[in-house]
Image: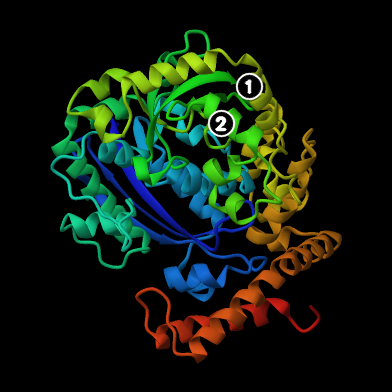
Amino acid sequence: MAESFYFYDLETSGLDPRVDRVMQFAGQRTDRNFKPIGKPSNILVELADDTLPSPGAIMVTGITPQATKQDGMSEREFCDFIMNEIATPGTTIIGYNSVRFDDEFIRHTLWRNFYDPYEWQWKDKRSRWDLLDVVRMTRALRPEGIEWPVTSDGRSTNRLELMTKCNNISHEHAHDALADVVALIEVSKLIKAKQPQLFDYLYGMRDKRAVQKLVSLKAPQPFVYASGRYSSQFEKTTVAYPIAEGKNKTILVFDLRYDVEDLLAAEKDGTYIEKYGSFWQKENPKKARIDFSPIVKPFQFNHCPAVAPLGVLEKDNGWEKIQLTREEVERHLDNLRKHPEFIKRVKKIINDKPAYPKAIDAESALYDGFIDNRDMMLCSTVRRNGTEELSNYHPPFSDERLAELLLHYKAKNYPDSLAADEVEMWEKYRRERLARQETKFIAEMEKIQKDLANNKAFGSKTVEECSYLAEELMLWYQSLRGADY
């Protein structure tokens, strides 16, 4: 197949990909000129009976667990669809904040269903791209020809539904996955039409090898960097500089908007949190620990970062747009180089931060380690088998996570394949997982019901619509609790 784009969006049962689940998938393939190829996909994914969704999420999406049961495909079927219909050779898979959110849900879903959780985004000349940072850099450096939204108090915002509204792009039913996909395609066309050079450049930078040529500790140089960690006051964009190795194949970069001399002086006189701390740190100064974040932050090469050489600032008043000057950057860089002890100290502070929290169970243990080639072959055998074959299939996995995953996989997809002791093990796990979710679910439901009693709806929905969703959620909860829960 010729190179193509595949735009996609998810709606989920909550925000944590280790715990929450995909409930809706929508996508549209296009050619490189955004002309649709085939029909769009709009799929519900069945929510298993081991999951209590976040009531707040359901109030936003309007998708009930019962709807996914009635009209959705199973997670196993969804994974087959992703790998066979979406992740075709030469496809660039595109979303909006997808690298940090949607892609994580896809990866964890594939993991639970015995697919390689990574190859969908790189094998057979596939790639992924995230348009959110593209929008951020375009707004910061080349905003001409596009209307840019602001909040009611005048702050910059790049929310997709506001981008479409400002630019007269139809976007009914925001937070419906298919509506968001259609809107994202139109926003992409707008940026490509108004700023084609920047669009094409950042498309090329989705490849981490291209990024590594610009951002390197071997030949460090300042570079332009747009990231959600930076302030909207400066359109999320700054000039950064590589300073040290981070964890997990990252490097640490310093925001040259700041002078290290000022940071050290503020740390010494006790005013650092007041001057440079995050909102949370300023609200909790006694609990706050100075970690110099996000002035120093990890930089991930494989997250499609929006980066560019300094030369991009020499055109169209680039320096002025991000409220920096070349002289400031050079002075701050000179001062940074005079303080190797600061670099050494901040490297230790950041790299010593606790790692990703240890997984509670195998389903959330994706990042506890890679699986070897032998286990990967056994995983493919699991996918090819059905009820009869799985009944007596006990593969000799070397990774202990996979044996637990297999029990869950069988229980959800081929329950008749379970032996009596396996049924007991699954029910024990299911009850424990529900119990871990229950406290948060009940607290959210109580708040929602209180708001509804005061005639307060959520988002664009009516009180009646929200009341219906709340009733469905309570019915779902009661059905999962069971008589002996």
Residue labelled with disc 1: 342
Q: Earlier in the sequence, mark 1 or mark 2?
A: 2
Quarter of the figure that contains the C terminus:
bottom right
Residue labelled with disc 2: 263
Asked if residue 165 lies left or right of residue 13, the reply is left
Residue 184 position, x and y percent, is: 28, 50
Q: Nearer the viewer, residue 237 or 459?
A: 237
Q: Secondary structure at mark 1?
A: helix
Q: Nearer the viewer, residue 149 or 441?
A: 149
Say which quarter of the image contains residue 260: top right
Where is 389 relative to 324, above or below?
below
Q: Is any part of residue 35 visible from this angle? A: no
Residue 319 position, x and y percent, is: 27, 28
Toward the top, the furthest residue is 219
Asked if residue 225 lies left or right of residue 312, the reply is right
Q: Residue at x 60, y 28 (%)?
A: 264
Q: Residue at x 77, y 49 (%)?
A: 404
Residue 164 position, x and y percent, is: 23, 56
Where is 176 relative to 452, above or below?
above
Q: Residue at x 49, y 48 (%)?
A: 101
